Image: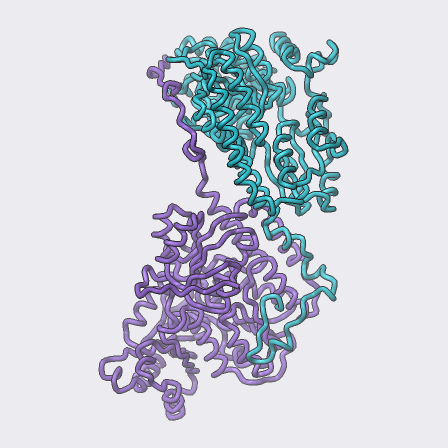
């Protein structure tokens, strides 16, 4: 690992804005945020994956992966970030290094050519170049190549130095957004500024989630100036320094960029969530309060309260008819951490029972909050092995699993409904309307008649006395009626 | 229990129904050495034949008694005799299946009586089996015509006979493809039973290249086998329409089992349970595995079919088979059926409209359907409503391999679920800000750079 990258990683692990981080001893902090990975028992993404997750939703950028094929050939076109403009971000660009390129040290030359070609072919707002394990290992200086290419082709070319071996997905998130602060933020100026310009960090507009919230902001006259990175244009990242307030959408990984925006440009930030009703309201409230503190008209607060009252009432009215469909059903929650608790509290209000929630990425503060919401800490657990989860579900100790894609098949193979609440999901669940969509999705899933059929034993596994009555004698008589269940 | 709605209107727009004589002709074509003969005017036959040629992509040896103005008034008995004589001369069929049409039935001919009298007189016709089914165009549709033909065959050609201990009668419904029949026959054979399939389109209209030109069907159920059906240990009738035929066989001492459907986990389970009882045989490992694979396919497909709004326009038995399967996966159905039938009443919906594709289009629009399931004539409404269109039923003239589509048994159900899910996936939904009522981003942020300098 290069000294520069080592230093960057150390910097990323020193985060004064993060309560968890500051509470650590110097030694602990040096070890990083993520737990050391265990060979043979690790399943998460790498640093490159993390950087890509964070930055790929910037829509008009050519994301060029400098690597042999596996990194992007196996990774592209697998996320549902939606764009209202360019679809350039969805295309897969890689240098696809060959053995000869690596042996002969031709990686840098090939990268330079690839940058030229992608600019000529796609006319992107910028090119982001991602270094990966192999290209970092052979010592390709992507910083130098990007600098030369930017000068030569008159287009921003941004190096993102994130070899997979550097660490986890979480670290990659940090390194990725850090590159934005270093190279992009502050390089462009908006035509006009308003007192209600904000940055949103950590929302990826999955299936349009940002747009579920945006109408609320539209109505309050709040403009999303900068975004990292849902439905973001390169220019919006470059203009982020002019926003009045930054909202960090439930993501510790993006804390660094929020703090740097504050340090460098004096933009205050707060952490909020758009998942669940109460959290959405809290986020809007905080946002407006902070905007007013920075010069927005004071009536923003009253308009905000009116909007919240109206939306909450409308949402509960929409949820109420769904109550009979979900009340009394038991949910097992297995997600990355804290972002769904506001959802949990809404589900509980609808009469659902949360029988367990994972705490694998949670902080002590998170624990407190879960205990507060659930009334007990009895149902918190750390990592759950797939086998253990399968047993729990197969024994019908939960009616539905809400989790990310990795445990999907644990639930399905145990004949238990599964709701995707992670980044690969295909339905948007943000804001007030998203909560209604989520409960509808739960209803649709747990009440699908398929489950009963699926759990029924095969004809050859049925005990003889449970076999349906033979229609023989009945149907042998002309004119008799034998019905569907009989046969 | 669905309520049947008969729309109060005189105009039928874009017909869904296919005429009963055509169904009878199709059934007759599943007999070896057969020529179906329409007793009616020449045009009845021409339209039906072209319809079938377009669907099967095969020459269809459908003939007509070519009723003229005089015979339409004075009676067509002689036309039948002449037709049989000519067909025997030109194509030496072993079997001639007569289907009446609206014309002769409106006139009220006693075709059965005249035929009996004529066959008694014409001993030279004795080596051709001649069967007659009353199938006026104004009663029923494809499934009814098909069923009437099978009943006529049973009545004319099957007698009580010595027990055949491993033999079962299989009566496939009108909308079963060659692949469907092969799947179900294979399942029966897997339990050590031997099916006599009446009629068997999998041998005649499966689309195979014959070594010579014949003026009759290219294969099908052998007449010798039909004669033994009275000795089978059971009749397995597929579809409610086949119940009367099964009951005719039951009157000869063969117990009848009517399966409204052999598509969907529960329906196939019921069929397999019957095979277990009839055969006393162990369930083959391949069948167990096919069931496990279907169960897994249901898991994968339920994400796409659960809550899916489907507009369905089908014949009753096919509608019940496919509709029940989709409803069991959580789909929401809007149904128009071609004809009224007990099968239609069993559909798991509030109401079924007995109507045409015009009705279906209107209902599909009103219900916000996301998928269309009907025959090929639905293609225009699919275009207008921007819906993926899965073709099922008759006719399907704008796709190839119609007879290869298998939607029965554990395997066919699996294929059907994938087919539906893939049709949904083939119309990907890309969310837009407008969908959520969000304003568009200011164009000032859009990238508008100078032309790239590359050198």
Image vertical order of residue B32 relative to residue B8, above or below: below
Coloring scheme of the render? Answer: by chain
Residue A106, image x, y percentages = 51, 15
- The part of the image, by quadrant, that contains residue A382 is top right
The answer to whether residue A79 is above or below residue A410 is: above
Q: Quadrant of the C terminus of chain B?
A: top left
> Is residue B67 shown left or right of residue A6?
left
Q: From the viewer's perspective, is B10 left or right of A151? A: left
Report the chain shown in cyan. Answer: A
How many labels sit on residues? 0
Task: Name which residue lies at 38% across and 19% down.
Answer: B447
Say which of A235 and A387 sits in front: A235
Picture layout, residue A216 above or below residue A438: above
Residue B424: where, in percent of width, then height? 47, 45
Image coordinates for residue B83, horizontal then vertical, percent: 32, 81
Residue at the image point whose x is 32% and y is 63% from the top: B12
Name of the residue lying farthest toward the bottom: B121
Asked whether A402 or A219 is in front, the reply is A219
Image vertical order of residue B427 relative to residue B158, above or below? above
The answer to whether any part of residue A267 appears in the image is yes
In front of the other: B284 or B100: B100
Give the chain letter for purple.
B
The single residue placed furthest to the left in the displayed view is B69
Which residue appears farthest toward the right when viewing the image? A378
Q: Is residue A234 left or right of residue B417?
A: left
Where residue A272 sits in the image (x, y, percent)?
A: 58, 22
Camera sees residue A91? no
């Amino acid at each position: 690992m290069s000294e520069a990258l080592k230093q960057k990683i150390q910097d990323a692990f020193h985060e004064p804005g993060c309560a968890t981080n500051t509470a650590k001893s110097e030694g602990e902090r040096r070890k990083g945020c993520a737990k050391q990975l265990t060979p043979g028992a690790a399943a998460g993404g790498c640093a490159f994956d993390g950087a890509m997750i964070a930055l790929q939703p910037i829509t008009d950028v050519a994301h060029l992966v400098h690597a042999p094929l596996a990194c992007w050939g196996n990774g592209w076109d697998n996320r549902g970030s939606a764009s209202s403009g360019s679809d350039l971000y969805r295309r897969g660009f890689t240098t696809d290094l060959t053995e000869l390129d690596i042996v002969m040290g031709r990686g840098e030359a090939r990268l330079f050519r690839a940058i030229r070609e992608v600019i000529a072919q796609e006319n992107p707002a910028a090119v982001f170049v991602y270094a990966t394990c192999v290209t970092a290992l052979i010592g390709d200086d992507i910083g130098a190549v990007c600098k030369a290419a930017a000068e030569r082709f008159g287009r921003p070319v941004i190096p993102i130095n994130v070899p997979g071996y550097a660490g986890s997905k979480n670290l990659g998130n940090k390194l990725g957004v850090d590159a934005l602060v270093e190279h992009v933020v502050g390089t462009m100026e908006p035509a006009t500024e308003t007192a209600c310009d904000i940055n949103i960090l950590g929302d990826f507009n999955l299936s349009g989630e940002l747009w579920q919230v945006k109408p609320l902001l539209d109505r309050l006259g709040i403009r999303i100036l900068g975004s990292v990175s849902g439905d973001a244009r390169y220019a919006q990242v470059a203009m982020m320094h002019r926003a009045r307030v930054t909202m960090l959408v439930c993501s510790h990984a993006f804390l660094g960029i929020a703090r740097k925006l504050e340090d460098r440009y004096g933009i205050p930030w707060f952490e909020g969530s758009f998942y669940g009703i109460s959290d959405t309201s809290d986020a809007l409230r905080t946002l407006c309060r902070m905007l007013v503190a920075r010069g927005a008209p004071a009536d923003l607060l009253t308009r905000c309260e009116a909007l919240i009252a109206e939306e909450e009432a409308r949402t509960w009215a929409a949820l109420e008819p769904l109550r009979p469909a979900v009340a009394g059903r038991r949910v097992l929650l297995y997600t990355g951490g804290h972002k769904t608790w506001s959802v949990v509290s809404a589900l509980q209000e609808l009469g659902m029972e949360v029988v367990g929630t994972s705490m694998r990425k949670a902080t002590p503060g998170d624990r407190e909050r879960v205990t507060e919401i659930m009334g007990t800490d009895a149902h918190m657990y750390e990592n759950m092995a797939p086998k253990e989860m399968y047993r729990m579900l197969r024994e019908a100790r939960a009616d539905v699993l809400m989790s990310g894609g990795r445990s999907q098949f644990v639930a399905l193979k145990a004949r238990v409904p599964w709701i995707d609440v992670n980044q690969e999901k295909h339905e948007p669940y943000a804001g007030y309307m998203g909560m209604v969509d989520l409960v509808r999705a739960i209803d649709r899933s747990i009440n699908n008649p398929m489950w009963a059929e699926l759990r029924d034993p095969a004809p050859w596994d049925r005990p003889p006395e449970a076999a349906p009555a033979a229609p023989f004698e009945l149907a042998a008589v002309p004119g008799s009626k034998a019905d569907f269940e009989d046969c | 229990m669905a309520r049947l709605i008969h729309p109060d209107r005189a105009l039928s727009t874009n017909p869904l129904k296919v005429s009963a004589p055509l169904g009878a002709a199709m059934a007759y074509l599943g007999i070896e050495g057969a020529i179906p003969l329409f007793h009616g005017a020449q045009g009845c036959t021409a339209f039906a034949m072209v319809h079938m040629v377009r669907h099967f992509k095969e020459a269809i040896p459908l003939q007509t008694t070519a009723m003229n103005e005089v015979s339409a008034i004075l009676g067509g008995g002689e036309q039948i005799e002449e037709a049989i004589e000519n067909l025997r001369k030109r194509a030496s069929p072993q079997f001639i299946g007569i289907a009446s049409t609206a014309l002769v039935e409106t006139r009220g001919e006693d075709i059965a009586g005249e035929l009996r009298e004529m066959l008694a007189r014409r001993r030279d016709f004795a080596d051709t089996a001649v069967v007659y089914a009353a199938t006026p165009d104004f009663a029923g549709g494809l499934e009814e015509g098909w069923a009437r033909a099978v009943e006529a065959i049973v009545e004319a050609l099957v007698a009580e006979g010595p027990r055949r201990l491993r033999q079962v009668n299989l009566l496939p419904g009108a909308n079963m493809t060659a692949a469907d029949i092969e799947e179900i026959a294979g399942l029966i054979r897997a339990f050590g039973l031997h099916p006599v399939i009446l009629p068997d389109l999998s041998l005649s209209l499966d689309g195979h290249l014959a070594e010579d030109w014949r003026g009759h069907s290219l294969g099908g159920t052998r007449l010798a086998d039909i004669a033994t059906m009275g000795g089978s240990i059971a009749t397995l009738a597929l579809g409610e329409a086949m119940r009367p035929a099964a009951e005719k066989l039951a009157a000869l001492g063969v117990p009848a089992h009517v399966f409204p459907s052999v598509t969907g986990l529960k329906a196939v389970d019921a069929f397999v349970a019957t095979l277990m009882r009839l055969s006393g045989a162990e369930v083959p490992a391949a069948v167990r595995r096919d069931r496990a694979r279907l169960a897994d396919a249901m898991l994968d497909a339920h994400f796409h079919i659960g809550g899916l709004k489907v507009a369905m326009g089908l014949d009753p038995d096919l509608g019940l088979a496919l509709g029940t399967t989709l409803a069991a996966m959580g789909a929401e159905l809007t149904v128009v059926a071609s004809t009224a039938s007990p099968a239609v009443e069993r559909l798991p919906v509030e109401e079924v409209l007995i109507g045409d594709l015009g009705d279906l289009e209107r209902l599909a629009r009103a219900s916000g359907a996301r998928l269309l399931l009907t025959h090929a004539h639905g293609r225009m409404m699919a275009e207008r409503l921007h819906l993926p269109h899965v073709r099922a039923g008759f006719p399907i003239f704008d796709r190839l391999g119609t007879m290869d589509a298998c939607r029965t048994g554990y395997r066919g159900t699996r294929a059907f679920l994938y087919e539906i899910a893939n049709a949904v996936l083939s119309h990907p939904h890309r969310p837009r800000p407008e969908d959520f009522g969000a304003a568009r981003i200011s164009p000032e942020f859009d990238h508008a750079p100078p032309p790239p300098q590359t050198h």
